[in-house]
Amino acid sequence: MGPDTDAAVAAARTAVIAPGTAAERWSRRPGRHSVVSMPRAVWNDLVVAESDDTVMVEGNHYFPRSALRTDLIRESDTHTVCPWKGTASYYTLTHEGRTSADAVWYYPDPKPEAEMVRDRVAFWKDVTVVE
């Protein structure tokens, strides 16, 4: 992680979320997740991402983008909007004829209150995060 990312995470950990804002209504207090073992995102017995530097937001591990196996993903046309994080983009996992559409999401340009997820990815559907 670079100094800009470290500063953004530090700011997110100490930020005061204003009552009544979208961030206050939709978030749990984000921050680096302390782990005993290294979290791994697993799909079809393949480790898709692994890092001891995840950020927990709304119960999801956000892994550094650099931890993601790029040989298993392809860009999706799907986009969704979170009221406080912004517009999410998705990747589809693919390997040996198997796919999991939109199983990986990320925020390419998160809103200011969600800077802690910039350059990070999270998983759902049939991807399991194990610690």
Image (cartoon, rainbow, N blue to C red):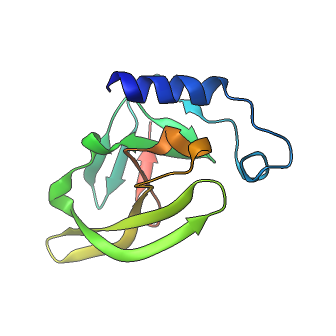
Image vertical order of residue 95 relative to residue 9, above or below: below
- The residue closer to the viewer here, 63 or 4, is 4
Q: Residue 55's x, y, as percent? A: 50, 36
- In the picture, measured across the screen, residue 91 lies left or right of residue 105, that is left
Asked if residue 107 can be seen in this view, the reply is yes
User: Is residue 37 in view?
Assistant: no
Residue 113 position within the rendered picture, expressed as x and y whole percent measured from the top left:
62, 43
Residue in front for this viewpoint, 49 or 98: 49
Q: Image point 39% across, 42% down: which residue?
A: 63
| Placement of the N terminus among the 4 image quadrants | top left
Which quadrant would the C terminus be assigned to in this image? Answer: top left
Residue farthest along the right direction in this orientation? 20
Residue under the point 27% across and 69% down: 75
The count of marks equals 0
Side of 46 relative to 22 (left or right): left
Residue visible at 38% across and 66% down in the picture: 90
Q: Position of residue 3 (x, y in %)?
A: 36, 21
* Image x and y of residue 47, in percent: 27, 48
* Rendered image quadrant of residue 93: bottom left
Would you place residue 53 above or below residue 112 in this image?
Answer: above
Q: Residue at x 23, y 75 (%)?
A: 98
**Relative horizontal placement of residue 39, taking residue 13 as reference (left or right):** left
Residue 44 location, quadrant: bottom left
Residue 92 image-quadrant placement:
bottom left
